[in-house]
Amino acid sequence: MRRILPCALVLPILLLTGCGTPEREVPAEPPEPPGTATDPSGSPTDEWEEPEGDEGDDSAEGTVRGTEYAFGEGAVFPYPVGAYEEEFREGVEEDVVYTVDDVALTPSGQVGFTLTLEVPELGRVLGTGFLDVRCSYEGHEGPATTEAPLGELETGTHVTDMVCGGPDSPSSVLVSVVNGEDEADFAGPVG
């Protein structure tokens, strides 16, 4: 029995040391953080690169923030066709066009211009309840005013004359037009 007892104790000890937790292998190089790759020279590089092109271009959304148009040039914004969102068909859109032209000094030396909206057949009206038109020139910024607000626009061409107050007789002006998500800047000399 004496011989069995030491063997009985040694065997479990041998089994425990042989079946213990394996040592953790340490990788030769630390793993790369997510979003990086290693080029053939062995130095890390970014997998994703910033696309080249104009900054601020968000044409997939139909708006281009910070884009500047010349007077008389149309700013185009695509709209889905249908009266309600559940009626919109994927890929079916029509373009609403904003134009600022006929920019000239009024007899009082203020800036006057014409804002035109061309509304295609959308199957609904185009609201202008959030239309905000502002002028910037010679360190001054202020709202443009009109005697004939546009309201809800049916299909067709809609024109309103607007005036900006501020310093007398500026040589150039920036007209910013914002209607919901539609944003465009029109700039040029005052005629």
Image (spheres, grey):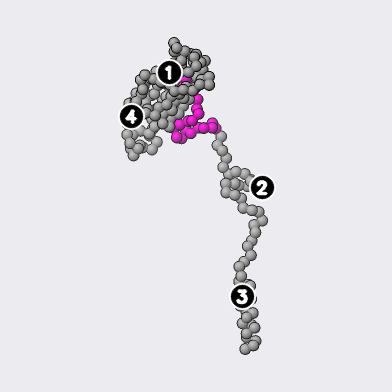
Q: CA distance from mark 3 to mark 4?
A: 83 Å
Mark 3 near mark 4, Cβ–Cβ under 8 Å?
Answer: no
Question: Which badge, 1 or 4, comes first in the chain's sequence?
Answer: 4
* 32 sits to left or right of 62: right
- Give the mark nearest the N terminus, 2 or 1: 2
Local SS, label 1: strand
Residue in the image at 45% along x and 29% along y: 183
Is residue 139 in sight in this rendering? yes
Between circles 2 and 4, the one closer to the viewer is 4
- Is mark 2 in CB contact (under 8 Å) with mark 1? no
**Residue 7 locus on image (x, y percent):** 64, 82
**Tag 4 or tag 2, which sits nearer the N-term?**
2
Q: Mark 4 falls on what kind of element? A: loop
Spot the residue most to the bottom. 1
Residues drawn in magenta: 53-77
Q: Position of residue 161 (x, y in %)?
A: 39, 18
User: Which residue is pictured at 46% across the width and 16% down the height?
Assistant: 111
Q: Amino acid at mark 3?
A: Leu
* Label ID, residue 15: 3
Number of residues whose C-alpha sits closer than 10 Å to that of mark 4, classed few (under 14), some (14–19) or many (20 or more)? some
- Would you say residue 113 sits in the magenta stretch? no
Give the Cα separation between the discs numbered 3 and 2. Answer: 44 Å
Q: Residue flagged by tag 1: what amino acid is it?
A: Val
* CA distance separating discs 1 and 3: 94 Å
